Each structure stands twice: as C-alpha cells, then as structure tokens.
C-alpha cells in the first residue's frame, strides 16, 4: 500500500494540458470532461436540479396534507387531470411521495453528495492529479445522467411515475393492476435504478482505488483528512451493497414482465386470481434493506467527514480523537450491514431474529455517540469562526443528536411495534439523514466553493439560509414526532375520516406553511450559487480559510492536473491547528526538531 | 390575478434580500474584512445561544401541547400496550437526558468559545481516558435499553395463551374483512384460488368441516371481548397491508401468501373509553399502516371492545359463510346432505386442472 511519489506518464500529459488548456474545446472541457473537478461540479449541479424538483414535490404534497380538500386552481393549470379541480388526485399524491423519496435519497444525497465531494476532494486532498481512472469517472457521471433522464421521463408518461413508495415493495409495485404507478412507471423506475447503480459502482471502485494507490509522498493512511476516510468507507459500503439492490430490482422486473414468482404468491387483485404461488413478498424487503440500510450511511458518512474537517478548521483546533473518529467510522460501516431487518420488525419476522437485530442496531449508537462527543470536544476551548460553513456543521451536529436519539426509539423492536410506519419514522429519518446530510452538504459547498469556482458565495445570504433552514427544520420535524407517537400512519393524504389522527389538522397546516418558507430560502441559496459562479467576490489568497490540507496548496483556479509544479510532499497529519502557539501548520511543512509531540 | 400578485411580491422580497446581501458584502470590504468578520461572528454566536434557549422552551411547549393526543403515554388500552408505553417512558427519560446535555454543551461551547483575540485555541488532539469514558457510558445506557426492550419484545411476541380467542383479519384494496372461527374455535382452511367475490370472498375450502361454522364479517366493526386475550391471524389478498391498532399500540403486516399473527388483551371496553376520553363518539380504529395504493389513507376499520355477554348477543345473530353461501344445506332451514360436492374445490384438483 505505498505511496505514489511522482507523476505517471499519463499524468504528465494532463500536466502539459494545464499550460495549454485553452485549446480544449468546450465539449471536452465542460461536457465530456475527465477532470475530476469538473465531474464533481457536474454531479453537484445535476444534484441541485434534482433537489429543486424533489423539494418542489414535497411542497406540493405538503399542500395537500396541510389543506386537504382545499382547491388550488393553479395546480390544475400545471398538472391537468392529476389535479382536477385544483385538488391533488390520490394517485398523484402517492407518485409525488414516491418520487420525492427516490430523488432525494438516491439522486441528491447519494449522487449529489458523495458524487460531488468524493470527486472534488479525493484527488485534491490526497495529492493526486486525478482519479485512478478518469474515464470511468466520466462514465460514472454519464450513467447517473442517463438514470436521471429515464426517471425524469417517467414523470411524463400517461399512467404517471412509480407510486408504490420509494421502497417499491412488491406486490404493490409488481402488479400492474394494483395502482396506476405500477404500470409503465414502475418499469422505468427499475431501469433508472439499474443505471444509477452502475454509476455508483463505477464511481465507488474509482474512489477506493484512488485513495489506496494514488496518495502523494508522505500521505500515509493515518495522515488522510477525515473527509477522505469517510468517502472511502462510503465507497466500500456502496460497492458491497448496491449490487444486492440491483439483483432485487432485476427479479422484480422479471416478476412484473416475465411471469416469474419471486415475490408473488396467493394473490387476488382487482377480482382476478393470479397463478403465482410460492414466492415471498418479504424477500424483496430483505434485498432492499440490505442496501437500504447501508444507504443511510452512504448518505451520512460523507457529511460526517466534511463536518469533522470544517469544525476543526474553523475552531482552529485539531479534530479531537482522530483515531477514535476513524474507529467509529469503521464500526459504523461494519454495523451498517448487520442491521437491515430493523426495518422489518412487524413483517412477521422471527422474534428471536428480531432481538438480534435490536442488539446490533442499538450498538450503532455507541460509535455515533463517540463521534458526537468528539465534535463537542473539538469545539471546546476553540476559537470558533462562524462562517456559513461552520454554522451548517454545527447545525449538522445538533440535528444528528436529535435524529440519532429518536433512532434509539425505533431500533428497539418493542417500541417499533407502535411507531413503525408512523409519522415518527418520517420525522426521525428526515432529521437524521435528510436534513442533517443536507447540512453537511451545504457546509461542504460553502467551505469548498472558493476551491471550486475561485469565488465566494455571498455570506449574508448564507447566514439567512442557515438560520431559516435550521429553525424551519426543527419546526417542521420536531412536532411531527408527536403525530407518530399518537400512531398516525405515514402517507395518509387526508385524515378527516379518522377520529384519532384528525386532531393534528392545525399542526399539519403550520408544518406546510413553514416548509414553503424553507423551500423558498433554498431557492435563494440556488440563486446565490449560480450568481456567485460569475459575479461572486473573487478569492485572493490560495488558502482563504487558513487550512492545512493539500487542496489549498493548489492555485486559486487549478487546471486539470491540479498542481502546476511537483505534487507537494506531506510531512504531518492534517490537524495541526493551534500547535505550539501557531495558528495552523500545513501538511506540507516538515516537522521541525523543536516541535512538541502530541 | 391573485397568483400574479403573490409571485410579484415574492420576487420583490427576493430582490430586496439579495440587494441587501450584496450591499453588506461591499460594506464589509470597505470597513475592512477583519472588522466585519468580528461583528458577524458576535451576532452569530449570540444567535446560537438564543436558538438554544428558545429551542428548549419550544421543546417543552411542544410537549405540553401535543403529548398523548390519543391516549396519554402509559394508558394504552391493552396489556401489551402498557409494556410498550413503559418502554417508551424509559427511553424518553434516558434519551431526554442525553439530548439536553449534548445540545446545551454544543450551543454553549459555540457561544463561549467564539473567536476572540484574548484567547488562543487549546491544542487538544486526544485523550484516551475521556474517550474510554464516553464509550463506556453510552454502552451501559444502551445495555439497559436493549435489556428491557428484549424482555418486553419476547413477552409481546411470545405464543398466545391457549384460551385466547381467534379472529382472522384479511386486508385487500381498500377494506378489512374478519372471520371468527365459530364454536369449534378453529379457522377452516383456505386456498386463494377458491376466491369468489359473491359467495366465497376469503377462498374458504368447503370440504374442511372446520369451515362450516366460521363467521365472516365485513363492513362493520370487529368485536372483541374485554380482558380476554385475542390472537389475530393476519393475511392479505393483493398487496401488503398492515393492521395498525394505535390505541392498543399493536401493529402487524398483512402479507399475501404469508400469514402473520399477533396477540394482546384489550383492557378497556369501548364504553369505558368513551368515559375516559370524554368523547361520546369514541371508536377504536384499525388503520392500514403499510402503503397499499391510492386508497391507503382511507383503509379504515373499527373495533368494538365489549363484555362477553354483549359479544355473545352479537355473535348469536351471525350466520356462517358456509350456510350463507349454501342456504339449502343449512340445518336450520331443512335437512340436507352433508357436503356440497359440486362447489368444494380441492387445491390438488385445482393444481391438476392447470394454471
């Protein structure tokens, strides 16, 4: 596992390119680019587009939840027969919910988050000129793009997109007669997902091999910045778990179109007796959650890594317990594979098996707690600068605590009997993996924007963005736990016929209004993002945050190949902040004889 | 027109905010980046503290207003529900303490250790003792939670008592059907290919004698006897549904092809609940908790919990599905031969007939 000192032949070519990169055509520079930085930006911008679409979907169905039965004529203008008379058709509602989940989990928080930051940060922080295979890297983006196109077109077919929930449980998703979304929409969902899985496998393999093989001289594994470790474990999780979903999806395609019975048995749908016997509907849930649970950490780990880095840089202190942070990342990655059935406590699972999954699930709380305490200690006696990135990182920690603790409720099967599939679950996972990961992503965007575009984002807008979003996130999701505690099921579009659940009508209204405000502020962020690419304040120093890591030793606008001269050599870990009275000591600085040991 | 105005106002708000943000950036440059940074730092540090205080008040207020909207925690309407409520209480106490301590520390540290020229950051890369402490303490807390959790879990999912009454619940898009086993206390066998919307909605096998007294109920509430354990045998015809009983704190998926069971003892009659909640229209509701298609949100059933006498009166009025489907065989109508052979489809015969 040794370090790559110099520059390979192939990279020399890129290196030369750098001096003459104006010769590149627009297409090869911005569209079919093999530069990891451009690919990262492509992932980010595609992710932003999807986030707007997915967010808009949530605003639409929140409108239905907050104001059931009320007519909004503008909806009919845009959505025609899906919103006849200005009210949302149930089938449309379920399509919105399904697409919101699919888009945000896979396209935004997987591709948009780790696609972006793994691409941008890995070569820059380990000291490599590009990924191990720039070509596969490019393919990874374009497979994602194709997956996006297929998913997007499914929104426009006559019977609508998939509407069986983002988990696509059969038989609902397998039977053409069970719902409109289970007609062509479900096939397109599965095909899109297959393309998406190819994309993440290509990306993941590339990230792993780059981190293992292409580190610069002196960059031992224990000198890697924490975002890189997080991306490494993320990639390993993805490579090991996504193929399982692929197989699950292919079997589902067979059941849907070729008459097999993997998931189907004893079914009478719409008055027709189907011939299928001997399949198991629960099998799909096992296959799905074998990916689905690691997926949660695929979403969360990159955010954790970036938050660790940003908190350390901005509190001007080393990250507390680097090795413990590594160990807990490792423990979480291992445990992520051993807890999937906690999503299935009420499927009739063998109670003994259930108890094993309770134990393994709650075990994850230990490494998570270690991480939280280490972040807190990193802040303790620091000298904290509240850049927008720092605030988002702090917000991440707060949300991770809140959402992590409610996970202890759900991971305990006894309580899960009552809370399973209620709004409590919705509140829990939105806080801990939805909003928290978004906070990690925002923190990353604000922090590395100067590296990506050579300009700053407007920070006043950044502060507004942070404060509205964190207040909004808590206002939306905190009270939602109580709906769940009262037993209110997820995915109910109108509660007026329910005696027990209709008591929350006012609360639902409040949540809807807040979510519209929060969505509007996200649009402001998007505007800030695109405006600042062209008109933002220019970065004048190569190291604007006073950080130790290697990306800040490149020119302000690095070309393909990243460093103009030799790749710098690394002499120390990345977290020497405040050591021996010095504010920061870059990784490239040799250890002097007089330096104290830590 | 109204829409236009709303859009115009939003756009204007957007523009104003943006101009202010842009202006503040110029002001910062003019006043000196350092000075401006110190000021925003102070403001944000202060806001973080305010957020903590208002947030904690909000958490308290939210709890006062929303806790126990159906039934206060600890007053579930079944024996298993009480165990779940107790587990919930233990978990709320432990996680509540952790929540309070960590959130206060997080925001307090941010406020206290905001950038200042008077202080230098403390170089503190690791400390094994501290790290061991905060590995061990969560581990102990979680052991307590896992321990209680597993004990209660096995109590709830263990075998139902022998004297438990049995009710079969079948979900389909988008309704609930119930079957009572009748005097023999055995549910007769079913085979889905025997389904017939008119006279055999559950696909009962008529040549199984246990089926003859099974009572089929749909379109009206399920009746249960108070303080008598009941075992629900749960299935589905088309897609996965879920029997959610929020007042009893019970829940189990209804999976086509794989029957599931759950049991509990209802401890409060519907009448008692009407008094307790002060709501004369109180009903126990069955909600479908697993997404099952476009009518998922309306898949509602009701339960009436009553005394044994009341239950017997209700049950006495019911006729078994067998005799409803074949009135000519009903002994209470007239004497008839034992089994209706023509309509008794055997699964084996069905299979041989080919799919």
Image (spheres, coloured by chain):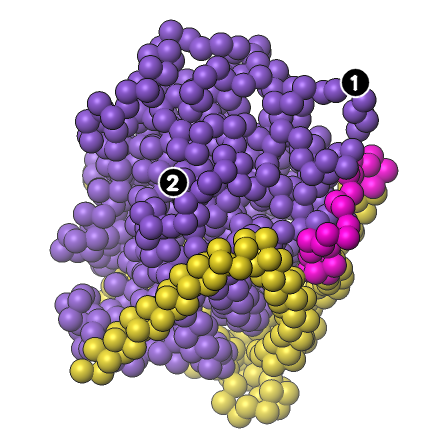
Chain colours: A purple, B yellow
Direction from residue B250 to residue B3 in the image, left or right: left
Question: Badge 2, how many Cα within 10 Å: few under 14, some, many 20+?
Answer: some
In this orientation, does residue B99 appear? no
**Residue identifier under label 1:** A593
Q: Chain of mark 2?
A: A
Residue B125 sits inside the magenta stretch: yes
**Mark 1 falls on what kind of element?**
loop
Give the percent coordinates (x, y) of residue A405. Answer: 65, 55
| Res. A86 image quadrant | bottom left
Q: Which residues are magenta?
A: B107-132
Q: Give the vertical position of B114 relative to A128 (above or below).
A: below
| Res. A221 image quadrant | top right
Question: Badge 1, how many Cα within 10 Å: few under 14, some, many 20+?
Answer: few
Direction from residue A89 to residue A404 in the image, left or right: right
Residue A161 sits inside the magenta stretch: no
Label drawn at residue A453: 2
């Amino acid at each position: 596992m040794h370090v790559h000192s110099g520059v390979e032949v192939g990279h020399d070519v890129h290196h030369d390119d750098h001096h003459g990169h104006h010769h590149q055509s627009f297409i090869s520079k911005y569209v079919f680019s093999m530069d990891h930085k451009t690919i990262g930006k492509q992932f980010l911008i595609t992710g932003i587009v999807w986030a707007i679409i997915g967010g808009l979907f949530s605003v639409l169905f929140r409108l239905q939840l907050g104001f059931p039965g009320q007519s909004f004529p503008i909806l009919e203008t845009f959505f025609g027969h899906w919103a006849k008379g200005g009210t949302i058709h149930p089938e449309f509602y379920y399509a919105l919910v399904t697409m919101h989940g699919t888009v945000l989990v896979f396209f935004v928080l997987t591709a948009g988050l780790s696609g972006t930051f793994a691409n941008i940060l890995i070569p820059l922080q380990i000291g490599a000129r590009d990924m191990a295979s720039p070509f596969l890297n490019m393919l990874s983006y374009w497979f994602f793009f194709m997956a996006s196109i297929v998913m997007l077109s499914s929104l426009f077919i006559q019977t609508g997109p998939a509407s069986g929930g983002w988990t696509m449980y059969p038989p609902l998703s397998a039977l053409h007669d069970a719902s409109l979304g289970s007609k062509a929409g479900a096939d397109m969902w599965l095909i899109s997902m297959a393309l998406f899985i190819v994309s993440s496998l290509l990306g993941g393999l590339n990230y792993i091999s780059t981190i293992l093989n292409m580190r610069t001289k002196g960059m031992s594994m224990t000198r890697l910045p924490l975002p890189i470790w997080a991306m490494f474990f993320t990639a390993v999780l993805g490579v090991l778990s996504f193929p399982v979903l692929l197989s699950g999806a292919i079997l589902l395609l067979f059941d849907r179109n070729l008459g097999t019975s993997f998931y189907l048995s004893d079914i009478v749908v719409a008055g027709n007796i189907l011939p299928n016997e001997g399949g198991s509907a629960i099998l799909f849930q096992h296959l799905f959650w074998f990916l689905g649970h690691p997926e949660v950490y695929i979403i969360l780990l990159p955010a954790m890594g970036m938050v660790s880095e940003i908190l350390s840089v901005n509190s001007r202190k080393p990250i507390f317990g680097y090795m413990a942070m590594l160990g807990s990342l490792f423990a979480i990655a291992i445990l992520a594979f051993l807890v999937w059935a906690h999503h299935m406590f009420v499927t009739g699972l063998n109670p003994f098996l259930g108890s094993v999954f309770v134990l393994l699930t709650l075990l994850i709380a230990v490494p998570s707690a270690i991480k939280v305490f280490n972040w807190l200690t990193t802040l303790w006696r620091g000298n904290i600068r509240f850049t927008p990135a720092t605030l988002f990182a702090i917000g991440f920690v707060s949300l991770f605590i809140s959402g992590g603790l409610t996970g202890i409720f759900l991971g305990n099967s006894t309580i899960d009997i009552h809370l399973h599939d209620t709004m409590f679950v919705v509140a829990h996972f939105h806080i801990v993996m939805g909003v928290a990961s978004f906070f990690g992503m925002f923190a990353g965007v604000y922090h590395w924007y100067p590296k990506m575009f050579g300009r700053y984002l407007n920070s006043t807008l950044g502060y507004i963005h942070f404060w509205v979003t964190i207040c909004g996130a808590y206002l939306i999701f905190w009270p939602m736990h109580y709906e769940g505690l009262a037993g209110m099921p997820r995915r109910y579009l109108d509660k007026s016929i329910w005696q027990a659940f209709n008591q929350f009508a006012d609360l639902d209204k409040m949540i809807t209004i807040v979510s519209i405000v929060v969505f509007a502020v996200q649009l402001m962020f998007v505007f800030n993002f695109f405006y600042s690419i062209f008109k933002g304040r220019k970065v004048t120093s190569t190291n604007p945050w006073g950080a130790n890591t290697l990306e800040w030793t490149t020119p302000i606008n690095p070309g393909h190949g990243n460093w103009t001269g030799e790749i710098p050599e690394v002499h120390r870990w990345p977290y020497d902040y405040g050591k021996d009275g010095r504010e920061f000591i870059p990784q490239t600085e040799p250890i002097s004889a007089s330096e104290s040991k830590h | 027109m109204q829409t236009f105005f709303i859009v115009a106002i939003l756009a204007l708000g957007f523009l104003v905010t943006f101009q202010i943000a842009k202006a503040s950036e110029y002001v910062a440059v003019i006043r000196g980046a350092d000075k401006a940074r110190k000021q925003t730092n102070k403001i944000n540090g202060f806001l973080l503290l305010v957020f903590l205080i208002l947030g904690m008040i909000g958490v308290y207020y939210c709890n006062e207003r929303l806790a126990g909207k159906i039934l206060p925690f600890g007053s579930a309407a079944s024996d298993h529900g009480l165990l779940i409520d107790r587990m919930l209480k233990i978990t709320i106490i432990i996680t509540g303490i952790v929540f309070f301590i960590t959130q206060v520390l997080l925001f307090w540290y941010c406020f206290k250790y905001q950038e200042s020229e008077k202080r230098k950051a403390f170089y503190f890369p690791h400390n094994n003792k501290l790290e061991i402490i905060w590995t061990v303490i969560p581990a102990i807390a979680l052991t307590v939670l896992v321990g209680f959790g597993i004990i209660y879990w096995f109590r709830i999912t263990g075998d139902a008592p022998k004297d438990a009454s049995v009710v079969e619940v079948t979900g389909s898009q988008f309704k609930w059907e119930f079957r009572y086993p009748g005097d023999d206390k055995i549910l007769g066998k079913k085979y889905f290919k025997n389904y017939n919307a008119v006279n055999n909605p559950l696909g009962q096998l008529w040549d199984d004698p246990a089926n003859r007294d099974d009572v089929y109920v749909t379109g009206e509430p399920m009746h249960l006897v108070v303080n008598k354990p009941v075992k629900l045998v749960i299935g589905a015809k088309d897609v996965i549904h879920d029997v959610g009983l929020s007042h009893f704190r019970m829940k189990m998926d209804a999976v086509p092809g794989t029957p599931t069971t759950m049991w509990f003892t209802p401890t409060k009659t519907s009448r008692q609940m009407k008094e307790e909640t002060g709501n004369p229209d109180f009903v126990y509701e069955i909600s479908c908790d697993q997404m099952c298609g476009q009518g998922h949100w309306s898949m509602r059933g009701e339960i009436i919990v009553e005394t044994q006498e009341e239950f017997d009166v209700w049950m006495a009025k019911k006729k078994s599905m067998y005799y409803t489907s074949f009135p000519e065989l009903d002994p209470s109508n007239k004497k008839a031969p034992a089994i209706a052979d023509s309509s008794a489809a055997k699964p084996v015969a069905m299979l041989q007939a080919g799919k």
